[in-house]
Image: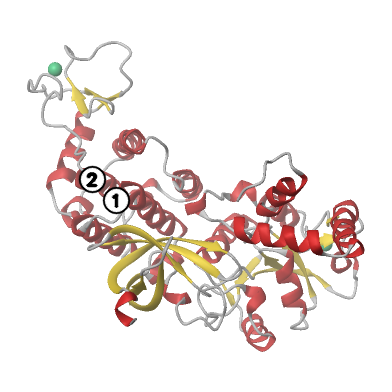
């Protein structure tokens, strides 16, 4: 069964299908759930989406999500602003935070993925280089996932930062290969962070 | 009924792994017995997954599959070989991913491909052992030949006449070299130096180790690279997705390392 695209239900299904991990069947299921849901519930969802797009933006320094110009980590002077942890996505920031890390971040918003055509220019890499070039950064910790793409990205960043004499380190080996950082338990991640090694 | 659950094993090299859903991945393999095919690996992005480490791209493993409706389902995995040193070189890793990408583009779906598989394994092993971009040129030459499109370099591809030992015109759409008489204006292609033609012929005829032992100057290597890229793009009717990344890494390397290190070990 498929709805015409101009039909309100068809439009909703079409929009839901664009979300990551949602196939046509799930999109239909969610659409009919919302149809049956009480009015306030559906409106709360719609408002939350509008609100997040209106108020949340990316930090001008580290590209983590924030409501202001700069995120709370970049503004916090008690944190070590010379220690930068580079992660793939904002979710990873929350994972690293749980380990008690006291430096700052840089969110790439992706990872090099040669086989899917994701190249350096699609990530916040030029901004990282610029940040390091301006000085004040002592160490860059590559906390990309322990996957092929994560390793490629870590190696690439090391090469990019070579001319600046900044130390580039990598989370300790022994993280399960192919895992997503935000799935890892805190103890594992803490060990990996403490045992980081020069790249 | 147990006999309706159809299981089969296949050896293969993981060419691609694309996330789907919450924690699943679509895994594309090149298998000597099953050619190129894609299966779904459930839950592999969770840390508790036992399969996860076995489905990273460029892993050579043995896998058990259950027949599924849209995709077969990967149910067990065992790693036979990895190429761990690729993770220490940006250039060689990019080269390895490009060969995997090319293998995916050239292999026929569900058709046994023992030669292409063997070629991929040996080229990945060479890159892992420190070979440079010459290994990629070899793969381009031989993988296209295995797919049924060997570059015609021995004589004019159109009239069959012998080619004098001088630069000749390579036209991908014709399938090889054209003599000056057969080359009509407007046919896309490029002039190849004699040294380049010899290099390509050598690659088509010789085993990998011999080809890698060659010392090739930068201009020859560059021209061979461009001709082979044009050849690959013509056959695939597109540029391999990973080609741009490889080019970018090559450019980065070339700025900081001698060309010698890029083409050779
Ligand atoms: Zn920030
Ligand atoms: Zn001719």
Q: Would you say B216 lies left or right of B158 here?
A: right
Question: What mark, if any, has residue A27 been given in the picture?
Answer: none
Q: Nearer the viewer, residue A44 or B108?
A: A44
Which image quarter has ligand 1?
Answer: bottom right
> Where is the N terminus of chain B found, in terms of image quarters?
bottom left
Q: Are marks 2 and 1 in contact (CB under 8 Å)?
A: yes
**With respect to residue A134, does B225 lie above or below?**
above
Chain of the residue on which disc 1 is drawn: B
Percent x, y of residue B60: 33, 69
Determine crowd level at label 2: few under 14, some 14-19, many 20+ residues with C-alpha closer than 10 A.
Answer: some
Is residue A32 among what the camera can see? yes
**Circle 2 residue:** B147
Along the line of sight, the residue nearer the viewer: B23 or B188: B23
The quadrant holding residue B116 is bottom left
* Quadrant occupied by the C terminus of chain B: bottom left
Which residue in the protein does label 1 denote?
B107
Foreground pick, A69 / B222 = A69
In this view, the residue in front, B59 or B96, is B59
For the image shown, how many numbered marks are present on the structure?
2
Task: Name the side, left or right, on which A97 lies relative to B207.
Answer: right
Q: Residues within 10 Å of mark 1 (few under 14, many from 20)?
A: many
């Amino acid at each position: 069964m498929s709805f015409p695209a101009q039909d309100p239900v068809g439009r909703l299904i079409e929009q839901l299908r664009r979300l990551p991990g949602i196939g046509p069947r799930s999109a239909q299921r969610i659409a009919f759930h919302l149809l049956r849901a009480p009015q306030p519930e559906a409106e709360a969802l719609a408002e939350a989406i509008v609100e997040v797009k209106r108020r949340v933006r990316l930090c001008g320094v580290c590209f983590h999500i924030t409501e202001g110009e700069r995120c709370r980590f970049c503004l916090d002077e008690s944190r070590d602003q010379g220690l930068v942890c580079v992660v793939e996505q904002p979710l990873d920031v929350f994972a690293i935070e749980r380990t008690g890390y006291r430096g700052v971040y840089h969110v790439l918003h992706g990872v090099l993925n040669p086989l899917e055509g994701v190249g350096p220019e699609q990530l916040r890499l030029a901004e990282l280089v610029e940040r390091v070039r301006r000085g004040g950064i002592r160490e860059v910790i590559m906390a990309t996932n322990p996957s092929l793409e994560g390793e490629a990205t870590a190696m690439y960043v090391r090469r990019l930062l070579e001319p600046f004499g900044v130390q580039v380190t990598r989370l300790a080996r022994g993280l399960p290969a192919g895992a997503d950082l935000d799935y890892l338990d805190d103890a594992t991640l803490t060990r990996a962070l403490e045992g980081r090694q020069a790249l | 009924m147990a006999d309706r659950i159809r299981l089969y094993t296949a050896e293969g090299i993981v060419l691609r792994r694309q996330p789907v859903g919450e924690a699943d991945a679509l895994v594309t393999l090149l298998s000597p017995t099953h050619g190129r095919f894609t299966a779904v690996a459930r839950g592999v992005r969770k840390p508790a997954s036992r399969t996860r480490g076995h489905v990273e791209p460029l892993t050579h493993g043995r896998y058990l599959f259950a027949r599924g409706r849209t995709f077969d389902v990967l149910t067990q995995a065992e790693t036979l070989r990895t190429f761990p040193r690729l993770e220490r070189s940006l250039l060689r890793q990019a080269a390895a991913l490009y060969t995997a990408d090319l293998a995916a583009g050239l292999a026929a779906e569900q058709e046994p491909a023992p030669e292409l598989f063997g070629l991929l394994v040996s080229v990945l092993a060479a890159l892992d052992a420190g070979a440079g971009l010459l290994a990629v040129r070899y793969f381009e030459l031989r993988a296209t030949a295995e797919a049924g499109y060997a570059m015609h370099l021995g004589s004019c591809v159109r009239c069959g006449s012998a080619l004098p030992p001088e630069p000749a015109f390579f036209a991908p759409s014709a399938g090889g070299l054209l003599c000056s008489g057969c080359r009509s204006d407007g046919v896309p292609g490029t002039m190849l130096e004699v040294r380049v033609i010899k290099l390509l012929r050598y690659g088509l005829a010789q085993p990998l180790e011999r080809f890698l032992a060659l010392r090739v100057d930068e201009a020859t290597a560059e021209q061979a690279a461009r001709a082979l890229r044009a050849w690959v793009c013509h056959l695939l009717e597109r540029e391999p997705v990973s080609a741009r990344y490889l080019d970018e890494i090559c450019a980065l390397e070339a700025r900081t390392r001698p060309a010698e290190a890029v083409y050779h070990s």
